[in-house]
Amino acid sequence: MRLAPQLHRLGNDVVACYLIDTPEGITLVDAGLPGHWRDLQRELRALGKSADDIRGLVLTHGDSDHIGFADRLRREHGVPVFVHAADADRARTGEKPKTPVGPLRPGPALKFFGYGLRKNGLRTHYVGEVVEIADGDVLDLPGSPVIVGMPGHSPGSVAVHVPLADAVFVGDALTTRHVLTGRTGPQPAPFTDDPAEALASLDRIAPLAASWVLPGHGAPWRTSPSEVGEAVRKG
């Protein structure tokens, strides 16, 4: 799905990841579920590109619904996978603390888990090798992604600011569609390790210049990052 000339979304409002297309090659942000591999191939064909044009994949964090095709891309095409050092083990092993489920409505929750099944979410392939990154890093990838630490959802959650795409990719630092209740609009994401820290981290993107705030779950959000913290807290 094309959002802007150089900005594309794979997946849908249930689970999404993103593609930035530049003359120097492609940068991906997150890798959804394993079944999003087909979505990736379809989007690449529409662009007249292939996986060999992908220069790097940046993970907003290491949870299973964000690393879906990451290891396949690394093994089959030699694409480096970047993740914050604090989430490196999470991406490599899946180890994470138990978190309260919180509010839930049967219909939306079943839709989330059903979508996960259709996209091979039970066949998680953890990432065999990662490149560790840190807050403040500017990656040598198309679009020059800037890493902004957003701890809370997980210790190594980050936002990825790509000025070329006029976008900030926030992973699960927030959601615009709660996968367990179906409620739409900006709000905290479920399955968060430290909800208070996650809310505080929203202020870290406030100074960034962008027109898109793009979560891993929910509709793309056209807003200024400076408005995000207040909107989520009010929500």
Image (cartoon, rainbow, N blue to C red):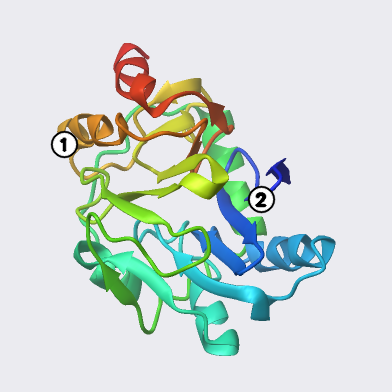
Tell me, yes or no, if residue 95 can be seen here: no
Residue lying farthest top?
Answer: 234
The amino acid beneath tag 2 is: Gln
Q: Residues within 10 Å of mark 2 (few under 14, many from 20)?
A: some
Seen at 21% across and 43% down, the residue is 152
Q: Which residue is mark 1?
A: 197
Seen at 56% across and 80% down, the residue is 72
Tell me, yes or no, if residue 110 can be seen here: yes
Which mark identifies residue 6? 2
Which mark identifies residue 52? none
**Sequence-earlier tag: 2 or 1:** 2
Element under disc 2? loop
Is 227 located above or below residue 18 in the figure?
above
The amino acid beneath tag 1 is: Glu
Is 70 located above or below residue 190 in the figure?
below
Corner quadrant of residue 172:
top left
**Foreground: disc 2 or disc 1:** 2
Is 51 located above or below residue 174 in the figure?
below
Q: Position of residue 141 (x, y in %)?
A: 47, 68
Picture quarter with the C terminus: top left
Element under disc 1? helix
Q: Position of residue 204 (x, y in %)?
A: 24, 36
In the image, 202 versus 26, the foreground residue is: 26
Seen at 66% across and 65% down, the residue is 23
Corner quadrant of residue 22:
bottom right
Corner quadrant of residue 135:
bottom left
Asked if the residues shown at circle 2 and circle 1 are in contact, with their CB atoms under 8 angstroms apart, the answer is: no
